[in-house]
Amino acid sequence: MPGPRGSQGGVVPWGDGPWRGRDQGSPRNQAPGRGRGGSWRGTGGGGERTDRDWRGSTSYSSSGFKDGNTSPTNANVTNEETGRKSTPTISSDNQKLDNPPQMDTTSHGRLKPPPDGGYGLVSKGDTTLLDANSQFALYSSIVTRFAKLRAAHSTIPGTLSPLHTTTHKHPHSVSSRRQQIDPESAEIAAILLSLRKLREGIRGSTRMDSFVKDVYMFNVRAAIALSHPESFVPGLIHLLSEVHENVPLTAEESSEFAGYYMLHLGCLLEDFNEAFRVRKRYGVEDPLVDSVLRALVARDYWKWAVARKKAKLHVARLMDMAAHRMREWTAKCWSAAYFTVEKGHVERVMGISWIEAKGVHGLDWELNDDGTKVVIRKRKQS
């Protein structure tokens, strides 16, 4: 997977950041009551945790911290110097964590049982999914949940909202870390995690039969529909390289999945040489896939727009990975060639609204007085 991205929350890793802070401000290095306000909980004498913790979030849901609370649940500890009880606190970002609570290994901690029927990752030591019956049960559950997700999008036939929407904020900014997760995104993440568990269980059991073939084909299609390369790339490679050798795909299936791999190589990685090698190796004869790759190689925005209009769900999702790059090339071509372009033509070719195109790509183009044409550059007055 280019490594699974995004964590699902969990335990506060006490061995990290807080221990690398400076010693100043720690109650251990001060006499009792020396902090501002005469208490260790004052802002100068040990520091009460501010609304910004060292991870940039405002609350914890597990591992000793209660949501909206600033102190650990096992708060009562005895100070060695004074013999009285005090409450351990997290100081500001540049200070230590004093008296950290012990790792919570109860049902509310890191070892909390997985929500999907108790299935865990084989790579983490859980062997439940090495059993064939458990694999079938989890697969049936995933198919049912994905079908419900698709049904929720019945108003827009054949489409699903991608898991990762395009954002232009720095990936490590505070605002991006504090984004709210809606129930739909949480369900998508749960489905993708369950698919990973199932893949690991199948690989760990060394099973190779028609069930494995069905699982991997479903995995690839579902993950592409959800725009999640970390899930469909490993499944796609395993399907074409190992499953196909033991449980052969039909000619139609081979062409379909090899075509997806070609589009991944071309649209996301821009590795066109490898994409055409895959085409030859698996004998892919798909005019639409060929048209997309040739449009990318030649930076032909018109041929790209025509292919995008013909593409169905999975091909369209893979093409979306190169859409931003293609719109950039389109804007450069128009900037060099035209003075004005019809607003409707801009939106049809770019596939987004005029306002979005202007904002996302930082275009300095303007609309004319009646709002029907885009003024790309003005003629110089003699």
Image (cartoon, rainbow, N blue to C red):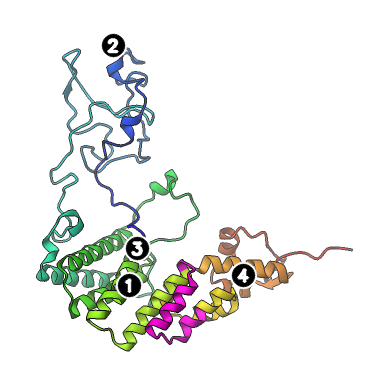
In the picture, residue 231 is in which quadrant? Answer: bottom left
First of labels 2, 3 by sequence position: 2
**Number of the front mark, 4 or 1:** 1
Image marks 4 and 3: residues in contact by CB distance under 8 Å: no
Label 4 CA crowd tier, 10 Å (few <14, some 14–19, many 20+): some
Q: How much space separates mark 2 and mark 1, taking CA atoms?
A: 63 Å
Residue at figure coordinates x 34%, y 57% from the top left: 3
Helix, strand or loop at label 2? It is loop
Image quarter in which the C terminus is found: bottom right
Residue at figure coordinates x 18%, y 76% from the top left: 208
Query: In the shown orientation, is residue 346 left or right of residue 40?
Result: right
Which residue carries the number 2 mark? 31
In the rendered image of this protein, does residue 371 appear above or below residue 308? above
Label 2 CA crowd tier, 10 Å (few <14, some 14–19, many 20+): few
Q: Residue 330 carries which label?
A: 4
- Amino acid at circle 2: Ala
**Number of the front mark, 2 or 3:** 3
Segment tinted magenta in the rendering = 268-292
In the rendered image of this protein, does residue 70 appear above or below residue 81? below
Asked whether 301 falls inside the magenta stretch, the response is no
Q: Where residue 24 sits in the image (x, y, percent)?
A: 36, 20
Prevailing secondary structure class for the magenta stretch in the rendered image:
helix
Q: Where residue 64 sits in the image (x, y, percent)?
A: 20, 37
First of labels 2, 1 by sequence position: 2
Which residue carries the number 3 mark? 230
Q: Where residue 162 sits in the image (x, y, percent)?
A: 39, 66
First of labels 4, 3 by sequence position: 3
- Amino acid at circle 3: Glu
- Amino acid at circle 4: Thr
Which residue carries the number 1 mark? 236
